[in-house]
Amino acid sequence: MANRIVVDPITRIEGHLRIEAEIKDGKIVDAYSAGTMVRGIELILKGRDPRDAWAFTERVCGVCTTVHALASVRAVEDSLGIVVPPNAELIRNLMFATLYLQDHVVHFYHLHALDWVDVVSALKADPKKTSELAQTISRWPKSSPKYFADVQNRVKVLVESGQLGIFANGYWGHAAYKLPAEANLMGVAHYLEALEWQKEIVKIHAIFGGKNPHPNYLVGGVPCSINIDEVNSINAERLAYVGTLLDQAFEFVNQVYIPDLLAVASFYKDWGAIGGGISNYLSYGDLPMNGYADVANFKIPRGAILNRDLSRVHEVDGKNHEEIQEFVKHSWYEYEGGDEVAKHPWEGETKLKYTGPKPPYQHLNVEEKYSWLKTPRWKGHAMEVGPLARTLVAYASGRKDVIEEVNGVLKALDVPVAALFSTLGRTAARGIETKLVATWAKEFYQQLLTNIKNGDSRMFVKDMWEPSSWPSEAKGVGLTEAPRGALAHWIVIKDKKIENYQLVVPTTWNASPRDPSGQRSAFEAALIGTPINNPDQPLEILRTIHSFDPCLACAVHLYDEKGRYVHQLNTF
Amino acid sequence: MIQSKPIMVLGIGNFLMGDEGIGVHAIEALSKEQFPEYVQLMDGGTGGFHLLGFFHENDPLIIIDATIDDEPVGTVRVIEPRFANDFPRTLSAHDIGLRDLIETAVLSAPLPKIYLIVISIHEIRSMVMDLSPQIEATLPVIVSKVQEITAKHSR
């Protein structure tokens, strides 16, 4: 008899996610992924000034706010034929890189590490041995026995007070935890250090975007000016501070994140064969080095991979009506034309049609509509998006820096290329990407300084700012890569107002329901075959779902074979 | 003279979700009032971990957020939590919940003095940017609560 497990997240940012999975003989045999909250930003935007759209879309998500703003201004610029100045592109790249650095590190340490690191076991560690371990893998200075003993004491106080706080939701002591106590203590110490560090790096957003969270963007450029000598603009002192923060980020990623990632991964190599799921990968690419129109010069290349065939990268065109399409067969929407048709986002419709059970409910009827997420497809294929997809597209595109890093990690772990197509591969790809971004960010920064020294201070073009200069109808697409995957906004402008606006966000690609032909999306597919050691503590589900970095908080509800509620875990 | 940390008024919530965004609307209302320069107003939106720095760089910190609890809709309360456990679990989540944020902040440094102004709302509504009349009516109440607190800490 199959056990039914339900994962039902509680976030309200991008929408709740719920996963219903069936377990048989200690393995997941089928899974359904449902977004249980409607987003509806499309309806809010209709009729508004296109130049304001970024400020609304930035609020859709609490984690990747800046990339929504970026996708939005790009969609408007694309529709009106606006080309932003080189400095604006560089500053957008720096904002992008800052988000990646902060978000990937926070994901690794604060949203994912505790699926692999046992906090309670860290209490048993020998601080001296922990120090030796830390010094073997990195030259990071905070590695003395005293340092680790202090961290251990802080955690001990928390545990003994019964206030585990943020650590309270773990399955501590679970048989699937494999790290020695010393590695666990090192992980916990760096969890705390990463918290401190991430507060600093996001200050780059405030410097270039005026504030953080939710920094400012601008159609036609960036809303800041650089004047080396002026107090009120971005002056020499603040620019130098950006440089310092980027240096610190580079050091943290190379001396803490990457060594930890490799150390942890070396104990979980079996996860290089678990959680692979679908075999198609999509990246829109980003980080233009020669203007947004010159896709060949993106640091993160655009392309698609089918059937894990790394010898071929397919071209991707966000404007081609036959490429990116969304289905609503299993989604609580209706299309003019019925449930079997697919629509390109320019023709996309957001007509809500909830037919699910009245909450609270135990199970969704997965034969019918069961999600608020539409089902996006690329040329009819289900695609995984995210760090792994980007890394594979770059690898298959022959990007030397990416190939070198990927091969280095495979060699260090002594695993084959095929191990990339897995839960472990996703988590490793995120680290590899962070390391590359930390390097590229310094390049963007140097280029920005050079441009300014050479007298180029242009940050904004106002050519098409006035609506009187716009055509009566225009449409565009803004493609980018959120830390968690391919993100795009499509806009249709009519009579100076937004006529239609559609977002296809990364978690929609990964977490969407089946399409009309029954093909599973990434989450549903990746869970199949995942071993479940103890159905009361489905740590393994968290590992695979968290490896995608879903933009959601989760609560796991467990049901026994008769569908009775057994246990609930709140986590994120 | 010892340079003391600024006072911050931090409004959090999602203004795309109706009354859930009251914290952000409150910051907008407060920006029309006069405050001394050591008082900063911050629209924290749905900032999650991005807000963590504010817990260590300001003192006191005045947080404005919506809650769904058993109080009548439109109730405005000022809570002075001393420990992470004093924060109501019912507070809106904003992806990383406020309580999660506080439990995390306390791991790295002692918390500043915190005033939590919570507004009891009826429901979270997607696709709505306006406040319901009952919650709109709390804005002047919130403003005067903030004024009282900042006056108490005047420098």
Image (tube, coloured by chain):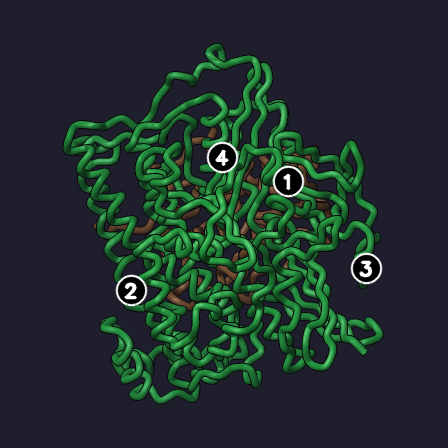
A564 or A160: nearer the viewer? A564
| Spot occupied by residue B121 in the image (x, y as percentages of width and height) | 68, 45
The amino acid type found where label 1 is placed reads Gln
The residue that appears at 72% across and 81% down in the rendered structure is: A25
Residue identified by numbered label 4: A478
Disc on res. A281: none
SS type, badge 4: strand
Q: Which one is closest to the eye, mark 2 or mark 3? A: 2
Is the residue marked by circle 3 packed among few (<14), some (14-19), or many (20+) residues within 10 Å?
few
Identify the secondary structure beneath mark 1.
Answer: strand
Q: Looking at the image, tell me whether mark 3 or mark 1 is earlier in sequence order.
A: 1
In the image, taking residue A326 as reference, residue A440 lies left or right, namely: left
The residue indicated by pointer 3 is: A361
Residue at 33% x, 63% y is A405
Q: Can residue B1 be seen at all in this image of the molecule?
A: yes
Q: Earlier in the sequence, mark 1 or mark 2?
A: 2
Labels 4, 2: one chain: yes
Residue A41 position within the rendered picture, expressed as x and y whole percent measured from the top left: 62, 37
Q: Colour of chain B?
A: brown
To which residue does mark 1 refer?
A: A325
Nearest to N terminus: mark 4 or mark 3: 3
Secondary structure state at the residue bearing disc 3: loop
Q: Label 2, label 3: how many angstroms apart (C-alpha)? A: 47 Å
